[in-house]
Image (tube, rainbow, N blue to C red):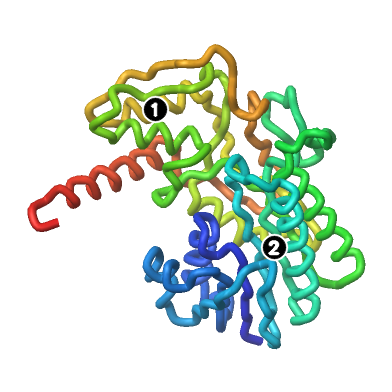
Amino acid sequence: MARKFFITGGTGLIGRALVRALLAQRSALNIDQLTLLTRHPERFRAVAPDIADAEGIRLLQGDMSSVAWPKETFTDLVHGATDVNDMQVSDRLAYAWSIAEGTRRTLEYAKQSGCERYLYLSSGAVYGPGPYPEAGIPENWSTAPDLASPSTAYGQAKRFSEHLCALHAEQNPIAVRIARIFSVIGDESPLDGQYALGNFVQEAISPSAACIRIKGDGTASRSYLHVSDVAKWLLNLHERGPRISTFNVGAKREVTIRQLAEIVAGLSSPRKAVIVEGKTPNYGGRTRYFPDCQLIVAALGVTEEHSLEVAISSILSNLTGRQKSLHQPGN
């Protein structure tokens, strides 16, 4: 039987990488169609024409909160639609509710449309505070984000959404897999907003920036998995993971924010100085935030194929080339 995928969040950074991985495996996986839910089909077509114009792709215009689901059968549903830039959210109550309601609606739709597999893209934000083990945060980490803190709305909503997945799997034969995704890097990574990496890259290539600035004290640490590796891990999980399972998805290598800035500076030309402006961490209270991925590596044999240096070099090269092109005569 030919497979038909319904995908929410397929137009974001991780979603685009996953859709490209599915298109590359379309014949091997017997995929007939990939339906991508998007609020702005034409905008997406301009950003990713290779996906929008690919054979078997259908763009469905709509919003998670109000879309009229197609009355047809699908074999697979991937739910990844969430705006993770919660620092800019003005109404956290509505934001949290939209995450949980979106998950509930897609679970119901997966049941109604006859899906055999459901993949939920969750987040490492579901975990509570450390100190964490040296190897990173394991899937069985028992603490949760502070329920009394409005700033944990994203993590709380993702955590509750995971519980909805578990309840749905208890009552239905559908395979439900959950991926708790940590920090991601790739050529299409956003370079604005709340992320240190994007800010460092922007300052590295900006003629008007004299240095690369660290707003905190630089001691907080993260790890960064290349988005193409993320996509391969997600595809492996969706295809081969245990019927009801939850796995971390992230890089093993831990780097401090100071080290990250120094890597960006070292790969930039000309090299700029790194200046630490703050005296205390300012990264949401998570001093060390990276996953222990031993479970998914052991269960599915996934590997990291891209180093952090290679990923940052590619971003810098692409941006520098784009700047040169913009300043050529006639542009």
Q: Is residue 297 visible?
A: no
In the picture as drawn, the residue positioned furthest to the top comes out as: 279
Could you tell whether 38 is left or right of 275 in the image? right
Q: Is residue 30 visible?
A: yes
Locate residue 111, reporting x and y percent: 80, 76
Residue positioned 62% across, 46% down in the render: 89
User: How far apart are labels 1 and 2 at the CA level?
Assistant: 34 Å
Compared with residue 262, is residue 248 higher up or lower down, i.e. above or below? below
Packing grade of label 1 (10 A; few <14, some 14-19, many >=20) is some
Q: Which residue is mark 1?
A: 263
Packing grade of label 2 (10 A; few <14, some 14-19, many >=20) is many
Residue positioned 39% across, 35% down in the render: 309
Could you tell whether 38 is left or right of 272 in the image? right
Q: Quadrant of residue 175?
A: bottom right
Q: Which residue is mark 2?
A: 119
Residue positioned 71% across, 36% down in the render: 151
Q: Secondary structure at mark 1?
A: helix
Residue positioned 63% across, 51% down in the render: 301
Q: Quadrant of the N terminus?
A: bottom right
